[in-house]
Image (cartoon, rainbow, N blue to C red):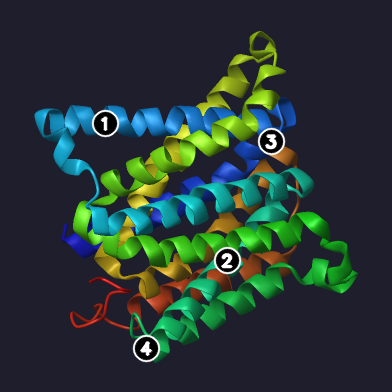
Amino acid sequence: MTLQAWSLAAAVGTMIAWGMNFAFVKYVLDHLGVGAFMFLRFLVLPLLGLALLVVIFRHRIAHTWPRRADLPRFALCALVGHVLHISAVMYGMNLSTAFSSSLVLTCQPLFTLAILAWLGAERLRKPQLIGTLIAFSGIAIFLADKFAAGFSRAGLGDLTLLLAGAAFSAYTVLQRPLADRYGPLIVLSYTLLFSMPVMLVLTYPFFADLKAASLGPAVWAAIFWALVVCSFVGWMLWTWVNSVRGIARSAPFMYLMPPVAGVMAWLTLGETFTWLKILGAAITMGGVAWAQFGSGPPPKEAAQPDSA
């Protein structure tokens, strides 16, 4: 398999895992609450990242430390990508449903493409824009019944998730030059490490009130999936995919999450879907395919966002 083929498989796999994750996270939040779960996340993931750095780099671990000129960008990525984005996702999902959360977060590709166009950081070609709009129309059909009820019913949870989508798009653009220079593992590990102190201080009181012994095996399995598989491995893979395929070609993959989340809702929550929703899912995936394959290989001369 070529590098492009591997990156395509990684992108699809990440979207499937993230789509499934909405149901897992909602399940965990119902048992732990937002604060306690966030404490575990910002305790476990930075330590996991450092452990992997030690295993992989061993005696060269000091060479992984970011250069002084890159430290402000690492800190900004930690603030936007972990502190702001994760906080908004967790509180938004707690106020909404798993399926609605996945649908609202499909705005992320639009935010990403808007940021890229504003910065002039990566050339956007017509098939990418057309594919994104087709995928967006599929989401609109998928949500037709909710639209009929009026946007006023979206509530605070959906608005918070909208902020989360914008924050993740900003993080995606900000971390791109760092990932090209340092690699996904180093970028993820140190951005997690830089976000760790403030988040542990803010969330520890919630964790202190948690009765961990009362949590069953199913809850711990869901925590492992949400933290290790989706939050750590998933973020690392997505960073690598953006480096290989380019941010503009990767962004429309986000539209694959709602259909996956919908299937999970059907399997675990007994939610049913009309033919209209099935049609919307098919159009969504068609739009993603057009954005990925209709534009041909990514241009070698595509500019990097602030890659100096």
Residue 44, quarter of picture: top left
Q: In what element is the residue under mark 4?
A: loop
Measure the alpha-carbon separation of dots 4 and 1.
38 Å
Q: Quadrant location of the C terminus?
A: bottom left
Q: Do the residues labelled 3 and 4 touch (CB within 8 Å)?
A: no
Residue 248, quarter of picture: bottom left
Q: What residue type is labelled 3?
A: Val
Kindly report which numbered mark, 3 or 4, lies closer to the viewer in this rendering: 3
Q: Do the residues labelled 4 and 1 touch (CB within 8 Å)?
A: no
Measure the alpha-carbon separation of dots 3 and 2.
20 Å
Residue 125 is marked as 4
> Is residue 179 among the parts visible in the rendering?
no
Q: In this view, does 70 lie to the left or right of 48?
A: left
Residue 103 percent coordinates (x, y) = 66, 61
Residue 54 percent coordinates (x, y) = 21, 28
Q: Name the residue under label 1.
A: 52
Whichever of labels 1 and 3 marks the residue nearer the N terminus, that label is 3
Whichever of labels 2 and 1 marks the residue nearer the N terminus, that label is 1
> Residue at position x 42%, y 73% from top?
289
Q: Mark 3 points at which residue?
A: 34
Q: In what element is the residue under mark 2?
A: helix
Q: In what element is the residue under mark 3?
A: helix
